[in-house]
Image (cartoon, helix red, strand yellow):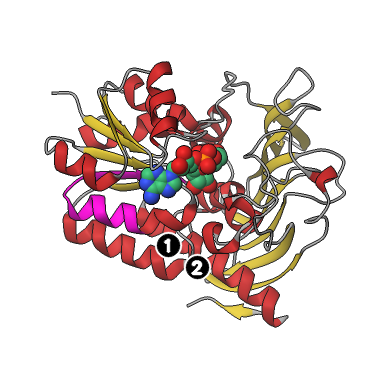
Amino acid sequence: MAVKAGIVGAGGMAAYHYDGFTRAGAVVAAIADMNTGRAESFAKTRPVGNIFEDLSGMLRALPDLDAVSVVTPNKFHKPLVIEALEAGRHVFCEKPPALNAGEMEQMLAASKKAGRILMFDFNNRARPESMAMMRYIREGAAGKINSAQANWVRRAGIPGFGGWFTTKALSGGGPVIDLPHMLDLALHFMGYPDPAWCLGGVFYDFMDNRAFKGPWGIPDSDAGITDVESSCHAMVTFKTGQTLMVRCSWAEFVERETVAVSFQGTKAGGKVERLFGIDGIDATSIDSCRLFTEEYGNQVNRDIVTEKDETMGRVGQAANFIETITGSAPALNTPEEALILMKIVDAMYQSAASGKPVQIG
Ligand SMILES: NC(=O)c1ccc[n+]([C@@H]2O[C@H](COP(=O)([O-])OP(=O)(O)OC[C@H]3O[C@@H](n4cnc5c(N)ncnc54)[C@H](O)[C@@H]3O)[C@@H](O)[C@H]2O)c1
């Protein structure tokens, strides 16, 4: 029997969930949005049997629903995830997992108690480049990874002024929490080690300058709030002795938008990188996946050639959630990893606020 799934939140990301779920053989039986007009518009592009105003209505009406995906603004992740888990459903939730580590702890406890799968949309792990690099790392080609650098930096990419992304109470913060993908990917490559210390700073420049708005995102709201950071630079150390530098920004003076993880191992270094084009993903964008090593006294660079995936792994990660439920593939991410990630996010904000290194418990 096909897995039966429902989606909560009919915004920009919902289509990727739908496409991934159906690619893996699931049936998307319902979509819910508090703005039912958005759910109705979605249903015109992709067939969904039922439209609801909220998750509770969906769960009541469809007792045979196996899985729910949560694609709402970040503040609603925790309550919706916990409601779906307590109702016995498997849950796939958009990133960031939660507003903070405390919320994530409650979500992890709820998934354990319910005995249901909880996964997140860390879609960059499912990119062909990342999957290929992870294979090399798992097979030992990089040796022990000592250090890594995680960068998601934008020159002008504020996703709307005054909307939920820029309102801390709804989003939890700016790029630190909105762009956790490269932090997650670096941790994935490093073996998700236990963090020890974090030292970092955040900046608020350009958050009142509409010349720094991205070419996408959600509409501006003049009456709305803009109280989140525009960039963050931090260092994290781990109990294993590994180290990680993290940079993320919506707006700062960099040459072009860069999304990359590089690392240095005892047998090879590596880099997975996307240099965005002038209009985002276009003919001028460059993707690369490379290993840097030494062979027979020669310094050797290897280009790993992979297929293009313009969804940046979003469809693949959603498909992997369904494959995890059916047991046809291992989970690409776990809620225990999400908790480590959220502890680092919390520590980045705490260190920035105090100006001091923060010990991560
Ligand atoms: N993985 C990625 O690459 C990626 C990219 C962009 C956004 N996201 C994440 O996806 C999530 C949604 O972002 P988006 O860009 O689709 O936002 P959006 O604002 O376009 O859509 C969110 C939708 O959720 C609805 N909604 C809000 N609260 C609700 C509730 N309690 N019940 C039902 N519906 C509710 C809203 O009416 C809206 O239609 C966020 O967590 C965001 O961080 C992920």
Asked whether disc 1 touches disc 2, contact meaning CB atoms under 8 Å apart, the reply is yes
**Residue 238 in the image, given as x and y percentages of width and height:** 56, 68
Query: Against 322, is 230 above or below?
Result: below
Badge 2 local density, few (<14 within 10 Å), some, or many (20+)?
A: some
**Residue 218 in the image, given as x and y percentages of width and height:** 62, 40
- How far is mark 1 from mark 2, CA to CA? 6 Å
Instruction: Kindly state the secondary structure of the residue where label 2 is placed.
Output: helix
Q: So how many labels did they put on this image?
A: 2
Residue 82 shown in magenta: yes
Type of the residue with mark 2: Lys
Instruction: Identify the residue at image location x=38%, y=39%.
Output: 33
Type of the residue with mark 1: Leu
Instruction: Identify the residue at image location x=46%, y=58%.
Output: 75
Q: Quadrant of the N terminus?
A: top left
The residue carrying mark 1 is 339
The residue carrying mark 2 is 343
Q: Which residues are magenta?
A: 79-94
